[in-house]
Amino acid sequence: EAQVTQNPRYLITVTGKKLTVTCSQNMNHEYMSWYRQDPGLGLRQIYYSMNVEVTDKGDVPEGYKVSRKEKRNFPLILESPSPNQTSLYFCASSWDGKYEQYFGPGTRLTVT
Amino acid sequence: QKEVEQDPGPLSVPEGAIVSLNCTYSNSAFQYFMWYRQYSRKGPELLMYTYSSGNKEDGRFTAQVDKSSKYISLFIRDSQPSDSATYLCAATGNQFYFGTGTSLTVIP
């Protein structure tokens, strides 16, 4: 089954404790991206990657890191999480990043 | 100014009504315009897309883009309770830009 998987689905952590949210796709897509979704602000792009070893900042990259060492994986790293990073995070993948993206199920992160 | 602005709603209509959802965008370089649908506790899914200007129809759904006024619309005919969801408009330049979403409830 074609899908994008994210882990964990739910995470509660404390300020400053480094964490990684994993994202994996099995569709051989070139393009992958991370979003955060907040009430009233909608879906905002954090980082995207057009291919292995190629990443670019989206609208809200501050406080986040990504890497793309393999085509199928695109982990999101929060080196020192803060409460304003409490949000619902989505990973997505696409053939070419033009219009159709497949989204993962989301990761609800709470930073206290 | 946000790249894509969307009427926030929420919108509540009776079953069978025609629904109109609207967005505006600011960057004339945008070429692809999309509508995603997001059910509660799920990730968004692509509903329809349009390349450049014009209309596109898929069953009860019609997507419309007017590049002269930078307006994106989605029309839903004969709305059904299963259409209840949040609808997100989006556009692409070198990255994806999403509107804030409109929550739609179709009442049986």
Image (cartoon, grey):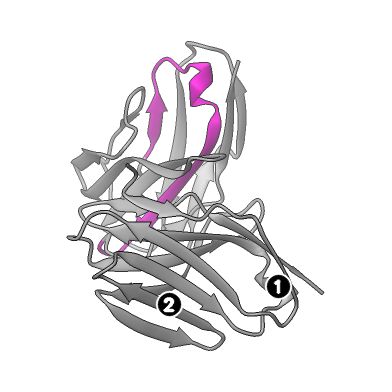
The type of residue carrying mark 1 is Ser
Q: Which of B88 and B75 is in front in this view?
A: B75
Question: Would residue B73 be seen by someone viewing this image from the given angle?
Answer: yes
In this picture, residue A77 sits left or right of residue A41: left
Q: Does the magenta stretch include residue A4?
A: no
Badge 2 is on which residue? B63
Badge 1 is on which residue? B82
**Residue at 26% of width from left, 51% of height from top?**
B95
- Split into 4 quadrants, where in the image is the N terminus of chain B? top left
| Disc nearer the start of the sequence (2/1) | 2
Write down the chain letter for disc 1. B
In what element is the residue under mark 1?
A: helix
In this picture, residue B74 sits left or right of residue B19: left
Can you name the residue that lies furthest to the right here?
Answer: B108
Residue B104, image x, y percentages: 65, 62
Question: Would residue A1 be seen by someone viewing this image from the given angle?
Answer: no
Residue A33, image x, y percentages: 35, 47
**Residue at 37% of width from left, 56% of height from top?**
A93
Bin the neighbour count of mark 1 within 10 Å (Cα to Cα): few under 14, some 14-19, many 20 and up.
Answer: few
**Residue at 60% of width from left, 40% of height from top?**
A9
Q: Which of A13 and A40 is in front in this view?
A: A40
Q: In this view, does A23 lie above or below B58?
A: above
Q: Point out the stretch of residues depicted in magenta.
A: A75-96
For residue A91, which numbered disc appears in the image? none
Which of discs 2 and 1 lies nearer the camera? The answer is 2
**Residue at 60% of width from left, 84% of height from top?**
B77
- Split into 4 quadrants, where in the image is the C terminus of chain B? bottom right
In what element is the residue under mark 2?
A: strand
The type of residue carrying mark 2 is Ala
Residue A84, image x, y percentages: 50, 21
